[in-house]
Image (cartoon, grey):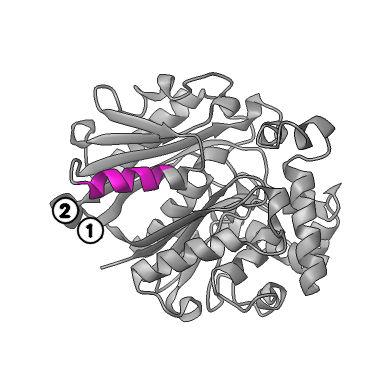
């Protein structure tokens, strides 16, 4: 990248099951706090990108009512109807163009106002899969999990270990919706079965909340009080879920390879200090270990068993609790970016991991992780 770009501010609202606030108020709170974190005012913003979705909001042109609370009035403004990590990519490209020096990026979702997994049905093939009524986000994830388990001999207990780890980590994150002190594999295995082998504690919880980050380039970034520099980014869009193998995350591997090449990462298993992964379902974190090059193909179960991804392990993953602890849908990947940046700047509070110099953040969208985006952040 010819211009250096950094995350210089960030904020997240508390993640709740049913927030006592409108989505506009949630966005306003996140935007104000992110600007204060960056030491900037609304006048300093050049462009604003929001991540929100017409289906989830229940209205067309869903960003229309977010212009004022996001600080975008009379500014260059746009949106993506995807994960917030893609909104950050859009903002990054605008800064790299040289037309802007500061960008505000905000993702939000208010799942309390719609049936949790119903919107995912609208991403299905309308002429066959949608009409048959068999697939949704959970049943599709169950097919993905079973395919992965059958191919590589992954056990339900190894999948449950991911949920136990992340929900246990979430206890130290005051913003998390779902946290389980001392979470165990047995507790996870005892939770309600949604669609075999997906159990309730292994699936993301319906969440209200918002996340905002401030990106800056050039002198603005260099003069900031804090900076988590974007060293690399890669993204890839895979085929529809019935047209690709489900036992691996091919698009995540390709996205990671692009990102690592840009960031100069050759051995991610030793060069990455920490990762924030968007694991919509627990088995996806095991699959992500492999796609991101943290372990060999088919060895995700052994990697979680080794303890490597615990907060005190050699490569901590999701010290914030990840998406299993809170999933404000269009903010989930953006929250991973914010959390990774907080780890770089040493501001992650009780879930801070010592000595983080290089961090990875991941976002996804689409059934069975169809689209993936990866960032590598670094300190000075």
Would you name the residue on which mark 2 appears?
218
Percent x, y for residue 248? 67, 64
* Residue reaching furthest to the left: 219
Residue 93 is a magenta residue: yes
Q: Is residue 215 above or below residue 132?
A: below
Quarter of the rendering occupied by the C terminus = bottom left
**Camera-side residue of 349 and 85:** 85
- What predominant SS class does the magenta segment belong to? helix
Mark 2 touches mark 1? (CB < 8 Å): yes
Quarter of the rendering occupied by the N terminus = bottom left
Q: Does residue 366 appear to the left or right of 70 in the view shown?
A: right
All told, the count of numbered labels is 2
Q: Which mark is residue 166?
A: none
**Camera-side residue of 128 and 303:** 128
Magenta stretch bounds: 87-97
Residue at 19% over, 31% down: 43
SS category of the residue bearing label 2:
helix
Q: Does residue 378 appear to the left or right of 128 in the view shown?
A: left
Q: Is residue 361 visible?
A: yes
**Residue 308, quarter of picture:** bottom right
**Residue 58, quarter of picture:** top right
Residue 338 is a magenta residue: no
Q: Which mark is residue 4?
A: 1
**Camera-side residue of 154 and 45:** 154
Residue at 46% over, 38% down: 107
Residue at 30% over, 27% down: 72
Distance CA(mark 2)–CA(mark 1): 6 Å
Q: Does residue 345 appear to the left or right of 154 in the view shown?
A: left
Percent x, y for residue 34? 34, 41
């Amino acid at each position: 990248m010819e211009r250096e770009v950094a995350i210089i501010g960030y904020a997240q609202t508390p993640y709740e099951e049913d927030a006592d606030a409108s989505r506009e108020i949630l966005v306003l709170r996140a935007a104000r706090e992110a600007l204060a974190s960056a030491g900037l005012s609304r006048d300093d913003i050049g462009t604003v990108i929001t991540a929100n979705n017409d289906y989830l909001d229940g209205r067309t042109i869903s960003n229309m009512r977010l212009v004022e609370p996001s600080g975008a009035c009379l500014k260059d403004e746009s949106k993506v109807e995807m994960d917030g990590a893609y909104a950050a990519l859009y903002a990054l490209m605008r800064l790299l163009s040289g037309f802007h020096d500061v960008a505000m990026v905000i993702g939000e979702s208010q799942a309390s106002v719609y049936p949790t997994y119903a919107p995912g049905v609208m991403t299905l093939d309308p002429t066959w899969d949608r009409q048959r009524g068999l697939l949704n986000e959970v049943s599709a994830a169950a097919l993905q999990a079973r395919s992965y388990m059958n191919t590589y001999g992954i056990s339900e207990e190894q999948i449950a270990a991911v949920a136990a780890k992340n929900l246990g980590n979430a206890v130290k994150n005051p913003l998390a919706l779902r946290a389980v002190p001392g979470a165990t594999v047995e507790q996870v295995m005892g939770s309600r079965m949604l669609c075999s082998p997906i159990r309730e504690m292994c699936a993301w919880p319906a969440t209200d909340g918002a996340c905002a980050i401030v990106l800056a380039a050039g002198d603005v970034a260099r003069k900031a009080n804090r900076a988590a520099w974007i060293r690399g980014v890669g993204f890839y869009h895979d085929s529809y879920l019935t047209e690709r193998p489900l036992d691996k995350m091919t698009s995540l591997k390709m996205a990671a390879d692009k990102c690592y090449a840009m960031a100069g990462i050759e051995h991610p298993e030793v060069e990455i200090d920490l990762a924030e992964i968007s694991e919509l379902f627990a088995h996806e974190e095991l699959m992500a270990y492999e796609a991101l090059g943290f372990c060999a193909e088919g060895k995700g179960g052994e990697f979680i068993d080794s303890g490597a991804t615990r907060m005190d392990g050699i490569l901590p993953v999701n010290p914030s609790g990840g998406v299993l602890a809170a999933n404000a849908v269009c903010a989930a990947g953006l929250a991973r970016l914010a959390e990774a940046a907080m780890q770089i700047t040493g501001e992650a509070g009780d879930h801070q991991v010592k000595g983080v110099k290089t961090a990875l953040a991941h976002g996804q969208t689409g059934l069975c992780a169809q689209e993936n985006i990866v960032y590598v952040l670094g300190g000075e």
